[in-house]
Image: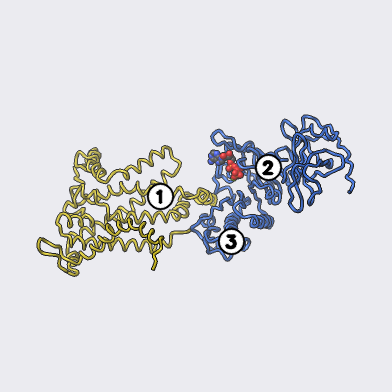
Chain colours: A blue, B yellow
Amino acid sequence: MPILTIRGLNKFWDTAHVVRDLELETREGEFIALLGPSGCGKSTTLRLIAGLEEASSGEILLDGRDIAALPSAKRGISMVFQSYALFPHLTVGENITFGLSVRGESRKVQAEKLARVAPLLGLQALLDRRPSQLSGGQQQRVALGRALIAESPICLLDEPLSNLDASLRAEMRNEIRSLQRRLGITMIFVTHDQTEAMSMADRVALLREGRIEQFDTPEMLYSRPASTFVARFIGAPAMNVIEAAVFDACGMNVPRSSLVGLRPEDLYPVERGLPGRVVQIEYFGADSILSVDLGVTQCAVRLQGRPSTEIGTTLHLGWDADAFHLFDAETGLRQDITVPQPKWTELQPA
Amino acid sequence: MKVSRNFIISMFLLFPAAVLLIAFTFYPTVATLIDSFFSTPRGRRPAAFVGLGNFERMAADPVFHRAFFNNLIYAAVTIPVSMGLALAMALLVNSRIKGRGFVRLAYFTPTILPMIAVANIWMFFYAPDYGLIDQFLGLFGLGGTNWLGQSGTALWALIAITIWKLAGFFMIFYLAALQQIPPSLLEAATLEGANYLQRLRRVVLPLLMPTTLFILINAVIEAFRLVDHVIALTRGGPNNSTQLLLHYIYQVAFNFWDTAYAAALSVVLLSILALIALIQFGFLDKRIHYR
Ligand SMILES: Nc1ncnc2c1ncn2[C@@H]1O[C@H](COP(=O)(O)OP(=O)(O)OP(=O)(O)O)[C@@H](O)[C@H]1O
Ligand SMILES: [Mg+2]
């Protein structure tokens, strides 16, 4: 049974339509990532759910009851802000119990709950400090503690890791995920970092200009992108999207109304395939990214280790049939038609 | 010993400020302190050392007592009321109300006016019978009150002017501080279930404390410093009912030319202010800065 259902959610800022007919459904205990480029309406969506902004239209159902008209305090939703929003004049302990205290819980209950939450986040030794005396990662934990102590069924996080450095971010990523699993809370997590979304989420909602482009598991987002936008957004480097005419060179007949998607990691050198001239080689240690000029466009190719190819030489590319994606050239949407694939002549080991 | 170039340059750069400070602050302070232990020189009679004589005289001086007591009332009312009003006005004009730009300007206007101009405006308000206040009260059959001319109301009339003038000034500081509070803090508090009053008491007011201290110090100084309107409107009268410390010092020094006694009075005023500043900075300051 879905715990949170969003139907036909819209938000206008004056005339700007920043959230458009958003539909979303999350199951209990799920970890959802809202992913998308800057300005696509991720934060706005989250703030609409939290009740910090008023929706222009639409329904938000939590456990079956419509919360769209309720004030944010009554929605039973907790939130971690990007800037953490810790109260500088309160200690760590007081910050975490702030909500319990304003809701009139007794000191005894506050202390009990604090004693339960603090160890989860390793904050026992820091409870009497003020936020200014904490590191970024510790502040992040306090913000998380404040969101968790209320035991709300849903916790929203707006780019919670963006203020941390790379190694701490990886650590907090694991910590948040394992905490979420252990406590069984539903989390909705905003990020513009695809690795974060792909590695943490059960399902990812990819937003574009206020619309959901695809809402699926990370595997499906990667292996069956619903549009060229998704194809280009997921993966580093992104999927190559190539005009149909290019494939005449390897004797394929691709419909002219289509675009072809091929991931750099799905391409490999063959003896006779799609020919292109190597124009650039970037070496990363475990793998290398080659830029190959196909005539009208360039495409990226990922190869293991350091390739023996030189810049300027011609490379023939091949791929497996299931790595070949087709998109409508007009709408950018995925097409499920099969195109006969050529038989690659394997490279003879030199 | 060779003096370094840097040293010479730094001395040279400090010189103008040092001259100004010494000539107009430190020297007068020390001179006043010294003068307070001497008698006033008159004609051929030079100043003679009188020890604590001036201070003993002060202890027995009913006008000084009156001025001191008046100043206490004046400070005790103007400081909290003007600060409270300033905060209330700042909260109001910081919220999303229609025409808040106009309201901000309106609240701030008294601050821009010179005190003498303010005094003249209020003279018209307070004038018996044809003044604004009496005309209004006249509608209800009240009126004929000489607000500035009778001992019972004169000090309160001045207090009202001071509050009117200072509240708008202090509001600007509160407004600036309010706009420094990150909106996400208030959103977080709201989400945690805090209502408006709880947000105010538990988040906004604590975060405004450094500003409150700053304003408090200013308010205390103003309460002892601001006497322009006394000079313009009442000259301490009637019957010393609006006599304030600084105005009394001014009268003693420049109307009666009793400079030694005025010096002694200045020393007392200075000590009071120093003591208050010491309490504020030494005690409160430590408790309200969170960063
Ligand atoms: N208070 C506001 N008034 C007017 N427009 C706004 C307001 N807040 C956001 N917008 C607009 O709404 C759009 C979506 O903003 P939003 O903050 O949701 O983006 P985002 O996806 O969170 O981006 P980012 O990754 O940069 O945080 C933007 O075009 C932004 O300019
Ligand atoms: Mg955002």
Q: Quadrant of residue A184?
A: bottom right
Q: Chain of mark 2?
A: A
Left or right: B179 in relation to A157: left
Spot the residue most to the front.
B2
The residue beneath circle 1 is B174
As rendered, which of B81 and B47 lies closer to the eye?
Answer: B47
Identify residue type, mark 3. Answer: Lys
Identify residue type, mark 2. Answer: Leu
Q: Which mark is residue A66?
A: none
Q: Is residue A170 above or below residue A213?
A: below
Of callouts 2 and 3, which one flags the residue occurring earlier in the amino acid sequence?
3
Using the numbered discs, state the Cα–Cα distance from disc 1 to disc 3 in whole angstroms.
Answer: 37 Å
Residue drawn at x 29%, y 59% is: B22
The residue beneath circle 3 is A113
As rendered, which of B196 and B181 lies closer to the eye?
Answer: B181
Left or right: A342 in relation to B13: right
Residue drawn at x 72%, y 43% is: A238
Using the numbered discs, state the Cα–Cα distance from disc 2 to disc 3 in whole angstroms.
Answer: 36 Å
Percent position of residue A225, x then y: 74, 40
The residue beneath circle 2 is A206
Q: Can you tell which of label 2 and label 3 is closer to the viewer?
A: 2
